Image: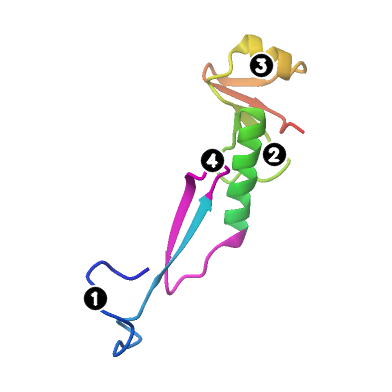
Amino acid sequence: MFPADETGSAEGRTAMTNATVRSVFVVGPDKNIKLMLTYPMTTGRNFDEILRVIDSMQLTAKHKVATPVNWQQGEDVIIVPAVSNEDAEKVYPDGWETVKPYLRKVKQPG
């Protein structure tokens, strides 16, 4: 991807005017973009972060949980607010930790 003000083809451009940004798009099974990350040419892409986000999105889709900042596989997750306590009791019979009324932490499922 080039800056919006860059016109024409690559012919005649210098390294400075040919500087691209690197974008990563994650497209879900519903064919909608779920994630966009854009890095300048001078910065490498963080594949560990991309994989972490994909793991998080798959976990969320399957178990109705959210992942906190810097979450890694196997760490506690958050029961999404859309899941009532009554429904959560069925899914998490061992219980959860209530940090705030809207913030319930539980061991990562399955």
Q: Secondary structure at mark 2?
A: loop
| Contact between labelled residues 1 and 3, with CB atoms less than 8 Å apart | no
Residue of label 2: 75
- Provide residue 29's location: percent of width, then percent of height: 58, 43
Distance from Cα at disc 1 to Cα at disc 2: 47 Å
Using the image, tell me which numbered label, if any, was put on residue 7.
1
Residue of label 4: 30
Distance from Cα at disc 4 to Cα at disc 3: 26 Å
Vertically, is 62 above or below 58? above
Callout 1 environment at 10 Å: few (<14), some (14 to 19), or many (20+)? few
- Provide residue 13's location: percent of width, then percent of height: 30, 87
- Provide residue 21's location: percent of width, then percent of height: 40, 69
* Residue at 58%, 46% in the rendered image: 70
| Contact between labelled residues 2 and 4, with CB atoms less than 8 Å apart | no
As shown in the figure, which amino acid type bears the numbered disc 4?
Answer: Asp
In the image, the segment drawn in magenta is 27-47
Distance from Cα at disc 4 to Cα at disc 2: 28 Å
Callout 2 environment at 10 Å: few (<14), some (14 to 19), or many (20+)? few
Which label's residue is closer to the chain start, 4 or 2? Answer: 4
Vertically, is 5 above or below 88? below
Callout 3 environment at 10 Å: few (<14), some (14 to 19), or many (20+)? some
Using the image, tell me which numbered label, if any, was put on residue 88.
3
Q: Secondary structure at mark 3?
A: helix
Which label's residue is closer to the chain start, 4 or 3? Answer: 4
| Contact between labelled residues 2 and 1, with CB atoms less than 8 Å apart | no
